[in-house]
Amino acid sequence: MTRESWQTRIGFILAAVGSAVGLGNLWRFPWMTSENGGAAFLLVYLGIVLAVGVPGLLAEFVIGRRSRRNPVGALSDLSDSKGWTAFGHVFVVTAVVLLSFYSVVGGWILRYVAASATGAYFADPGAYFAGIDYGIEAVAFHLAFLGATAAIVLRGVRRGIESATKLMMPAILVLLVGLAAWGLSLDGAGAGVDFFLTPDFGYLRANFLDILPAAAGQALFTLSLGAGTMVTYASYLGEDRSLVADGTAIATLNTVVGVLAGVVVFPILFALGAGAGAGGPGALFVSLAGAFAALPYGQVVGVAFFGVVALAALSSSISMLEIPVSFLVDEYGVSRPTATASFVGVFAVTGSVCALYPNVFSFVAGTLVDLLLTGGLVGFLLFAGWVMGRGALDEYRRGAGGLARSLATPWLYAVGVVIPVFLVFTFVSGVAA
Ligand code: PFF
Ligand code: NA
């Protein structure tokens, strides 16, 4: 059987942007920003996206397109080494860890779309969230979200992932722009914009070593780096086009959506007098729901907002499920439906554990994900830099324009040495703090 490939260039870009744009932009990013000093955090985060995110994305693309394999097969084929093959299996674990908690949050979102329409949380947003966050109903909504994810992945790369993301991404952008306009029109929105976009340099200097690991973790998560999704998506590339151009476009679009999300969320929170919102994963649900309950057209805006979040979450969760599915299809010759069904079985169980036990959820969504993504990306970077070497340079240059070509060698030094050192240092200092 011939391996699948993307139908169009824009199809690949939108699928990768679909993976990147997700709960990371709309839920985790505002939450991290509000806990780490607003614009000061934004500044550090943007620097890391540029200096670590884009080169890292290119490393995953180079590995994927060169090998035309899932992450396990890619590391195995390109190295012929037992050690790297074994390491490759970490990415199957990462996918399981990621989708387990992501699907629970996806379930909450589905629930909030419905609850916005009916106004179910309007009387008491705090009590509403506390009533649905963990437990048997959270399991049910997690399973619904997982089912939607599987329905797309089941249809394959072109008919599933590519056609779904081609519809979803424009819808997300249009709705977000509309929501941002609405948020900015609210009384008191200015304070929110200020918090989000005017950096407090005193805060930045005083807290730099706390901001750094949070910003690095957020940059990896938001660009879907270190999980093998970008290796997998690039493995379906047929033509010789510039990975540098595509990678830059993908990182830029993801950043635009993140900033737009902040422009939606912070004016709404400040307009309501909620300030930046207290920390914690649920805080954003509670504060935003409170805002929708109190503001004009809240019901409509609530459906639109949580609808956008649901679409964004789905276009990311399919990229998580695609990692282990492509692994079974490539390495064991299993059919796509069987591979999808097998992993849905796994996720049904692991996600339910996250939906039932708050402690498990927090550990998985926080420390464990940070560790796996950091370790995974460092692995890919060292692989591109030291194992592929010249091959990585050739693949990077294939289809690239003049400016991008001249950056090929510096890029290889960055991914082989500088960025791994930075990531390990940052991660360790974050754990030690
Ligand atoms: N980038 C996604 C987001 O911002 O929500 C999350 C993600 C997707 C992380 C896929 C890792 C991944 F492989
Ligand atoms: Na993202």
Image (cartoon, helix red, strand yellow):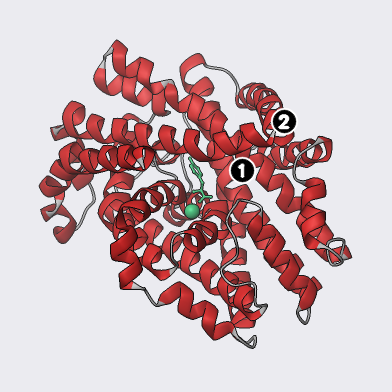
* Residue at horizontal 53 percent and vertical 20 percent from the top: 328
Residue 3, label in figure: none
Q: Residues within 10 Å of mark 1 (few under 14, many from 20)?
A: some
Q: Position of residue 179 (x, y in %)?
A: 63, 75
- Above or below, 346 against 146 in this view is above
From the top left corner, tell me how far across and down residue 210 is, in percent: 36, 52
Q: Amino acid at mark 2?
A: Ser
Of residues 136 and 6, which is closer to you in this image? 136
x, y percentage for residue 357? 70, 32
| Residue underneath mark 2 | 352
In the rendered image, which quarter is residue 310 located in?
A: bottom right
Q: Is residue 341 left or right of residue 212?
A: right
Q: CA distance from mark 1 to mark 2?
A: 25 Å
The answer to whether 252 is drawn above or below residue 187 in the figure is above
Callout 1–callout 2 Cβ contact below 8 Å:
no
**Where does the image place residue 221, in percent across and percent down from the top left?**
45, 46
Relative to 192, say whether 50 is above or below. above
On the question of residue 182 being in view, the answer is yes
In front of the other: 103 or 40: 40
The amino acid marked with disc number 1 is Gly
Give SS at disc 2: helix
Q: Of the residues under marks 1 and 2, which one precedes in the sequence?
A: 1
Q: Residue at x 51, y 40 (%)?
A: 366
At 75% across and 45% down in the image, what residue appears?
133
Q: Nearer the viewer, mark 1 or mark 2?
A: 2
Question: Label 1: which residue?
Answer: 160
